[in-house]
Image (spheres, grey):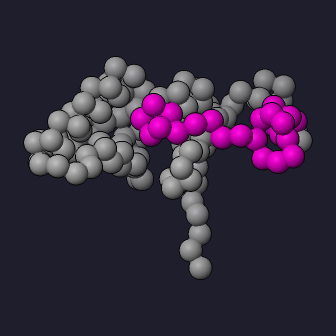
Amino acid sequence: MAFRIDLTLDCANPTRLAEFWKLALGYEDEPPPAPFATREEWLQQFDLADDDEDDGAWLHDPTGAGPRLSLLQVPEPKTAKNRLHMDVRVAGQGTPHERWARITEAVDQLTAAGATALREFSGHHVVMADPEGNEFCVC
């Protein structure tokens, strides 16, 4: 039996990082689980400190194809290379030149949104870091 997966990113600012990943992936805020009307209502069932309610963000692919993305606040900073990273696949069909143009356009948009280009493998992919330093590739 196959299982669906969720990806979770530890981060310092879930709200800011969620805005970045919504742009990068075309994701949306995930509605709270039934029967809860709001995420805050859902969080109240847990024994959290009052200031912990903004410590997470949950995103989903509106088409249902991609994994859910959870962004959870942690106190420690990122200190090493990720052992797992996402590939943001934007290239689609067309000539190699057309695909590379779409990749570089996406890199420009993500850079404007706070990402950093780390390494370019011309014609194939660009290694980037999100606003908190989590590595991903645009291909």
- Assign the N terminus to one quadrant of the image: bottom right
Please tell me which residue is depicted at 40% across the width and 49% down the height of the picture.
Answer: 85
Magenta segment includes 4 = no
Horizontal side of 48 relative to 125 (left or right) equals right
Which residue extends farthest top? 112
Residue 88: horizontal and vertical position, in percent? 36, 45
Q: Residue 81, percent across and down? A: 37, 44
What residue lies at 55% left-to-right and 31% top-to-bottom? 18
- Residue at 35% of width from left, 28% of height from top? 110
User: Is 31 a magenta residue?
Assistant: yes
- Against 111, residue 27 (above or below) is below
| Quadrant of the rendered image containing residue 46 | top right
Q: Is residue 128 above or below residue 88?
A: above
Q: Give the answer, above or below, for where 15 lies relative to 31.
A: above
With 90 as the anchor, is 84 left or right in this view?
Answer: right
Give the percent coordinates (x, y) of residue 130: 40, 32
In the image, what residue occupies the spot 10% across and 42% down?
97
Q: Residue furthest bottom?
A: 1
The answer to whether residue 95 shows anywhere in this view is yes
Q: Nearer the viewer, residue 102 or 131?
A: 102
Q: Is residue 126 above or below residue 92?
A: above
Magenta span of residues: 22-44
The answer, for residue 77, to whether it is visible in the render is no
Q: How many marks?
A: 0
90 or 13, nearer to the observer: 90
Please tell me which residue lies in front, 89 or 80: 89
- 81 sits left or right of 124 in the view: right
Residue 76: x %, y % from top left:
56, 33
